[in-house]
Amino acid sequence: MTTDALSGPSLDGRTALITGAGSGIGEACARTFAALGAKVTVADINKEAAARVAAETGGTAWEVDLSDTHALEDLSLEADILVNNAGIQRINPIHEYDPDTFRLVHRLMVESPFLLIRAVLPGMYERGFGRVINISSVHGLRASAFKSAYVSAKHALEGLSKVTALEGGPHGVTSNCINPAYVRTPLVETQIADQARIHSIPEEEVVASIMLTESAVKRLVEPEEVASLAAWLAGPGAGMVTGASYTMDGGWSAR
């Protein structure tokens, strides 16, 4: 194993499929993995964003709507590394939460990871190597009000990841979750207005008063920090790490 202290383990010769890779955490993962030698497939619903990141990383763009889960049922995919990252957030009290929106969140953040894992496992098993990395959240371990769909979806993803770890272990396949707090991404930026509306406070107060209130470290997580941990989990040194959930939450879940 070769390791650069500033970058991570060598991923030379590996192929990686990363969802939601047109921006945010997914883009950071695509750039980090490519820099470490992996051939990356940039999956995103935004065609232009996927094409841009793919072009800049020497990868391949895949325009895909992962909420259309029926279209994913017969997929067969070849990848050494799968990063399930795509997600959305919708905030409302349960009694006002739109049922179709609840179902959309679960299709995108539970069903599609299941179907993508299902699609890559046969090839991983055949090669005797695989890394499934699920970008969960501190909300996969803790709950917050007004996020019924997101919290329940992330909790479900945690369970899916652990079952994948148990089934994949004998075949050289690991499966883990990364659990960041609020990350500096477009997804979080769009939440600020929603949080201000729900809590009846100005938008400029949301980060300090709502997003960082539970964290001992009072800042947002950077996408590159998440990508760095994902790269380590993808590498050869993490072969005995499976079924785990790695918090990157500034101490939130220590409470």
Image (cartoon, helix red, strand yellow):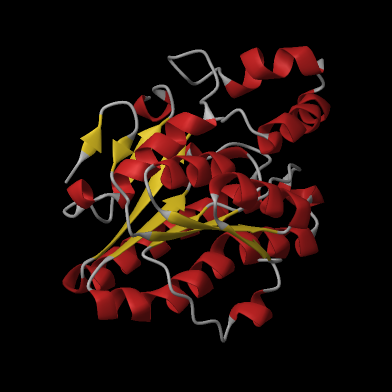
Residue 64 picture quarter: bottom right
Front position in the image: 191 or 230: 230
Residue 89, position in %: x, y? 69, 45
- Residue drawn 79% across the image and 24% down it: 196
In the displayed structure, 13 sits above or below 207; it is: below
Q: In the rendered view, does 67 fall on the left or right side of 174? A: right
Front position in the image: 157 or 145: 157
- Residue drawn 82% across the image and 15% down it: 202
Q: Is residue 142 something one can see in this rendering?
A: no
Q: In the rendered view, does 166 fall on the left or right side of 137? A: left
Q: Is residue 24 something one can see in this rendering?
A: yes
In the displayed structure, 249 sits above or below 134; it is: above
Residue 187, position in %: x, y? 68, 38
Q: In the rendered view, does 11 fall on the left or right side of 239? A: right
Residue 204, position in %: x, y? 76, 13
Q: How many marks?
A: 0
- Residue drawn 32% across the image and 73% down it: 124
Residue 55, position in %: x, y? 63, 50
> Residue reaching furthest bottom?
74
In the displayed structure, 23 sits above or below 254; it is: below
